[in-house]
Image: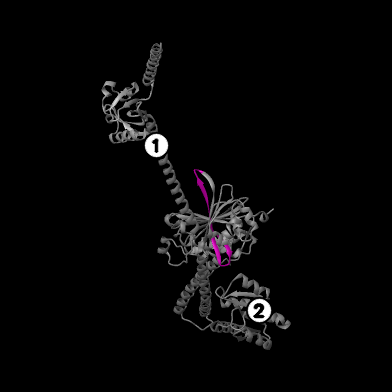
Amino acid sequence: MVKDEETRKASLLADDLVSLENYIHDLFNFSPLPICFVSPIGVMLEVNPSFEALSNLKSYELIGEPIEKLFEKSKIQEMTKETLEKGFVKGREISFSSGKEKKIPVQVFTRVRKDEKGDVVGYFLGFFDLSKIKEGEEELKKSQIALMNMLEDTEEAWKSAEQEKNRTQEIITSFRDGLLLFDKDGKLSLMNPQAEKFFGIEKEKLIGKPVSEFFHLSELRPLASLLGRRIEPLFRKELKVTEDFILEVSTILLIIKGKSSGYLIVLHDVSREKIIERMKTEFVSIAAHQLRTPISAIKWTLKMLLDGDLGKITPEQREFIKKTFWSNERMIRLINDLLNVTRIEEGRYLYKPVPYDVTKLIQTVIDSYKGEIKKRKINFKFKKPKEKMPEVMMDVDKMSLAFQNILDNAVKYTPENKNVTVSLTYDKKEIVVSVVDSGIGIAKNQQERVFTKFFRGANVMKKETEGSGLGLFISKNIIEAHEGKIWFESKEGKGTAFYFSLPIKAKNKIA
Amino acid sequence: MPKKILLIEDEDIMINLLEKKLTQEGYDVTVTKNGEEGLKSMREIKPDIILLDLVMPKMGGFEVMEEMNKDPELKKIPIIIISNSGQPVELGKAKELGAKDWLIKTEFDPQEVLDKVAKQIGK
């Protein structure tokens, strides 16, 4: 009975064992993870289908072979040893290759297997294929590197932009000229230390403010008046901050990508130049004044000799004295020109405007040239409107001089039997005087210097040694002081036409 | 009785020339070489006209005129300015102080001085 019972139990146990074995076998075969069983000396004893698939080898090609064939030798030996000692290894990374395929990274897990006596009979080895993950990691790394590179580039670009900015900042800060920058809304966005120093004011008080607010600050009122409420382009306009501190102000319209983006104001200190210029002017002025005394003494002496006041002289003596007298007159004219120039430069050339008839002024000057015109055999014409012209506010002496200088050139540099025509025209706004000659003309490359001090045309110098080169400079200053304009057209060898205009102001109009 | 002219001028050659020209014309000419002497002299001789230079040592022409304006007797004497300078400011000031006429030495000759003098006091 007992034996039957035991046999039945044993049979049941055997059934259980078989079903457990089947269960394990199925599980082993089903597992998507490659698993193998390895003997303590490192020989593969069993592999599952996943193992076969991954190694691309059949179980008969694997079983009995050392595990070292499939893994990095040194690492797998170490792992075997560690597994036998510790009982397991968890998630060790190692490379796997069947020899047919290229190496792939895998993560290995092991666990020892013992028999019922506790003796080690081998170990299980399972692993994950990390290649996909690794590939992903590689990708990630590449992206990371690319990103890092990009970051580096950006950083580099930022650094060089920063460097550029610092350099620009440094230039602006250490610039000897004062700089003010107004943005497109007309507000001050930058002021360098030199500009602060020029006006003795800190930029913090001004940044963000428009020029219109500068009028309220005594330090900046002169600049504000010069710039005006709406800034417009200026070129080297003089600004007298104090008697000895003079700035030249230029405004530059900033255009970025075709759009106006504000104004840069450049303040250049010209005090030193102005002082030197003033000293030079003073020197000329003093020298000219000092020269006048002996020159008038000479003039009067010669005149008295010629008038016979100092006794009888021979005709030959008279001739010589006459020539000396006229040389002296030339010197007087030259000195007067120099003095006029110094007065213009010192701003002392006073104008006392009175309403006056331009026709009368022109006629008077022409009359004084009648002898000269006749002597030089010039065909002279004066064209004027029949009706009485409106009077113009002018300083009569100065304006006569301005016109005389222009007429003098026309008469002097026109050959015999050629023409000089003076014309007078007017409209509601202005009177225009023109002096057209058929003289030697002004060379094209010298035309822009015509109104500068001491300018004399190269062709003129050959013809006449006399002349100070100051006449037209003086004329221009006189005309412009009357709010008029002067201009000319000229062709060398053909002739020159000078024009000047004088405004007729409402109060001067004849009803 | 010839008319009396007081010439106040510091430059010798101008003095010589003017003295000669005016004397030839029949005037009685007294010369002083600066403003101070000029004032003293005009009180003594009571001239009919004064020819006055502007820039002189010790006392200049403007100061002479200012002093003359303080004295009703002297104030009556006509003055013609003779100067090297033709600056409007100076001429304006001279006129204000009572000068009858003026001439710039480089722009006038001795004959014109005679004309101007004659215009003021006759020959």
Q: Residue furthest front?
A: A1
Q: Is residue A372 left or right of residue A186?
A: left
Percent coordinates x, y for residue A459 in the rendering: 41, 60
Q: Amino acid at mark 1?
A: Lys
Most foreground residue, A77 or A276? A77
Residue A95 pos. (x, y %): 32, 32
Task: List the residue tagged with mark 2.
Answer: B79
Q: Is residue B76 found left or right of A169 in the rendered image?
A: right
Q: Position of residue A52 (x, y in %)?
A: 31, 22
Report the span colored magenta. Answer: A237-258
Residue drawn at (63%, 85%), measured in percent from left and top?
B36
Looking at the image, residue A63 lies above or below residue A221: above
Residue that badge 1 annotates: A141
Looking at the rendered structure, the secondary structure element under dot 1 is helix
**Between A279 and A95, the one nearer to me in the picture:** A95
**The one of A371 and A399 positioned closer to us in this rendering:** A399
Image depth: mark 1 or mark 2 in front: 1
Residue lying at 51% horizontally and 49% vertically, measured from the top left: A254
Identified by mark 2, the residue type is Ile
The scheme the figure's colours follow is one colour
**Mark 2 belongs to which subunit?**
B
Which SS type dominates the magenta stretch?
strand
Can the viewer see residue A487 in this picture? yes
Residue pictured at 51% horizontal, 74% vertical: A287
